Amino acid sequence: MAQPATAQSRATQTSTVADLARFFPEATPVRIPIQLTRTGSLPGGAGVQESTVIEFGTSREVLFACATPLEFADVLRLRNSDGSLDTEASVVAVQYHPGTTIVAARFLNAVPNWIVKT
C-alpha cells in the first residue's frame, strides 16, 4: 500500500551563481578554476585559501561560489593555475546559504583581456 510522502522540489533549491549574475548584465558564463586567498586584515581571516571556479565574469567582476565565509569589501587574491590571472579583487556582493557563499568581486586594478567575448 502506498504511503503519503513529501519531497523537496528542485525549484526551491538555494540560489546559484547564475541567480546573482542576473544583477550583472554584462556577465558571461565561464569556467575558470582558481585559487582564492582572502588577504584582509581581520583576525583569523587573512591567508584563508580555497580552490573554486569562476562561473561568470565581466571585464571588471568575477562571480563564484565558495565555502569560505566572505563579507562585503573583503579583499581577495585570485589566481589561476598558469598565473595568467593573478590579481586582487574586492567583494561587492554576497549571498549566504548553508555551507556556501555566492560572491561577486570587482578587480582592484584593470585586468586586460582576461575575458574575451566573441
Image (cartoon, rainbow, N blue to C red):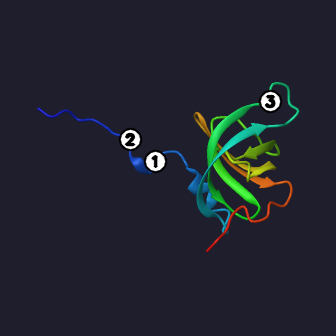
Q: Quadrant of the C terminus?
A: bottom right
57 or 7: which is nearer to us? 57
47 or 7: which is nearer to us? 47
Sooner in the amino-acid sequence: mark 3 or mark 2: 2
Question: Rounded to the nearest whole Å, what is the CA distance between mark 2 and mark 1?
Answer: 7 Å
Indicate left or right for 61 with 51 as reference: right
Indicate left or right for 88 with 117 as reference: right
> Can you give x and y, in whole percent of width and height, for residue 7 in the image?
33, 39
Above or below residue 115? Residue 75 is above
Query: Circle 2 is placed at which residue position?
Result: 8
Residue found farthest to the top: 44
65 or 30: which is nearer to us? 30
- Callout 2 amino acid: Gln
Query: Circle 3 is placed at which residue position?
Result: 45
- Callout 3 amino acid: Gly
Q: Quadrant of the N terminus?
A: top left
Few, some or many residues within 10 Å of mark 2 (<14, 14–19, 20+): few
Question: Rounded to the nearest whole Å, what is the CA distance between mark 3 and mark 2?
Answer: 35 Å
Few, some or many residues within 10 Å of mark 3 (<14, 14–19, 20+): some
Query: Circle 1 is placed at which residue position?
Result: 12
Residues marked 2 and 1 touching at CB (< 8 Å)? yes
> Can you give x and y, in whole percent of width and height, for residue 114 in the image?
72, 61
Above or below residue 88? Residue 21 is below
